[in-house]
Image (cartoon, rainbow, N blue to C red):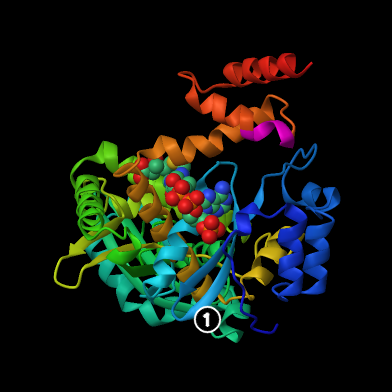
Amino acid sequence: MTENKVNWTGFSKKSLEERISLLAEKQLLSAEHLDNLKHNRQLPLKTADQMAENVIGTHSLPFALAPDFLIDGKEYQVPFVTEEPSVVAAASFAAKIIKRSGGFTTVIHERQMIGQAVLYQVPNLRKAQNDILAQKAQLLVLADEAYPSIVKRGGGARCLTVDIKDDFLIVYLTVDTQEAMGANMVNTMMEALMPTLEELSGGQQLMAILSNYATESLVTASCQVDLRFLSRDKAKAQTFAHKIELASRLAQTDSYRASTHNKGIFNGIDAVVMATGNDWRAIEAGGHTYAAKDGQYRGLSLWTFDQKQQVLKGTLTLPMPVATKGGSIGLNPSVQTAHDLLGNPNARELTAVIASVGLAQNFAALKALTSTGIQSGHMKLQAKSLLLLAGAKETELPKAAALLLKTEHLNLETAQTILQNLRDETT
Ligand code: HMG
């Protein structure tokens, strides 16, 4: 794929066909994936029938593009799967400002998954803990033997620890899963260890399963927003920056706000996780547990206004055990298109992209919330969705949307009434 400079300004104003043509012209997708987009090729029914149980069809969602993310010095066009209006617009808006300010930088702290084997009715917990730890090397070999293919690919079991919590004996295993998310791999290893663990501890097995609290797969995305891109008016820009810092502090102290703050972050994260065929429930579970790691649920991101440098600094840290191989990734044509659009990144690169998107999404939401309010941007796009749902034609949208936004009750019923009135006027 050739690097080709693209001017993304006004991408949203193009028609769907024009957007796909631009991707073709700039060689941002292979011929096969362009063809997938042109023909809206979806998950084949036969494949779907093998993926879940009692299948009666497939279910579609909008597949969108948030362009021009600059992450660790590289440009990415990011695929989003989301049903919510204004999410893609907000991410695109933030990506644009942050790129001009120097882009995102990321640090991937580790990339290992954690499995746990839990035993109960252990006669002597301390002795069992010591006996298991004395066999650590052999247990790591046993885990690797249960899944030899990952060892061949350079991964495998890495570390084993034992904890006592209440009357449970919990054995934790960290596993390098390489490009896979590794749920099956870790579960297989944990189950393989169980008989030996029962023997060593004298206890009973309760369960063996991967933990979604992936504290060994943390990523941090950071960015600095140059105040000049917040507003041309210096005083206004400083007020924006100050208020975004306050919003960030609020999410650290009030869990009610933290929940919504993090929902905004996951608006972007989930959209890319879904587009790339990853397990969004796992990412959500890990992210929210991490948000409560010190006993109080807090915002996952932090924003500070650096008065001296006149920049707004943002960081976001969370577990991000995503994969580029395995699971359903190879089965769904639009998932493959999403990976192609991103330049077929490896798991580390994909992790960096997703965390950056989360931070961008949060920046746009906080900027809107502390300035114009969320309604003006979000509702402008929500109005369009409501009108489409009410049966509006493309040509009716501008006038009908303007009227709908002026009403007190922005709902389907009002949208239908406005459309009807407009049609009555023109007949
Ligand atoms: P704006 O300043 O009116 O945007 O903001 P603009 O018209 O000046 O356009 C600027 C750029 O934004 C565009 O550049 C695009 O990149 C992008 P251009 O292409 O023109 O060179 N953009 C769009 N991209 C695609 N489609 C569009 C579009 N419009 C602008 N239609 C904007 C408008 C919506 C971006 C802004 O108001 C915003 O960011 N609002 C936040 C919206 C949001 O966060 N929505 C998520 C749903 S609400 C929620 O669930 C989360 C929340 O509760 C989280 C929290 O509480 O923290 C809020």
Provide residue 224's location: percent of width, then percent of height. 31, 69
Q: Is mark 1 within 8 Å of ligand 1?
A: no
Tell me if I can see residue 363 in this picture: yes
Vertical order, 142 against 172 (above or below)? below
Front position in the image: 99 or 314: 99
Instruction: Classify residue 387 as left or right of residue 373.
Output: right
Q: Residue at x 30, y 52 (%)?
A: 291
User: Quick one: SS at disc 1?
Assistant: loop
Residue 203 image point, x, y percent: 37, 55
Q: Which residue is mark 1?
A: 155
Residue at position x 41%, y 64% from top? 97
The location of residue 398, given as percent across then percent down, is 63, 35
Specify whether residue 378 is painted magenta.
no
Residue 341 lies left or right of residue 170; in this view the side is: right
**Vertical placement of 358 versus 132: above or below?**
above
Task: Using the rendered view, name the quadrant where residue 314 is placed.
Answer: bottom left
Total residue callouts: 1
Start and end of the magenta stretch? 394-398
Q: Callout 1: 10 Å neighbours few (<14), some, many (20+)?
A: some
Towards the viewer: 84 or 107:
84
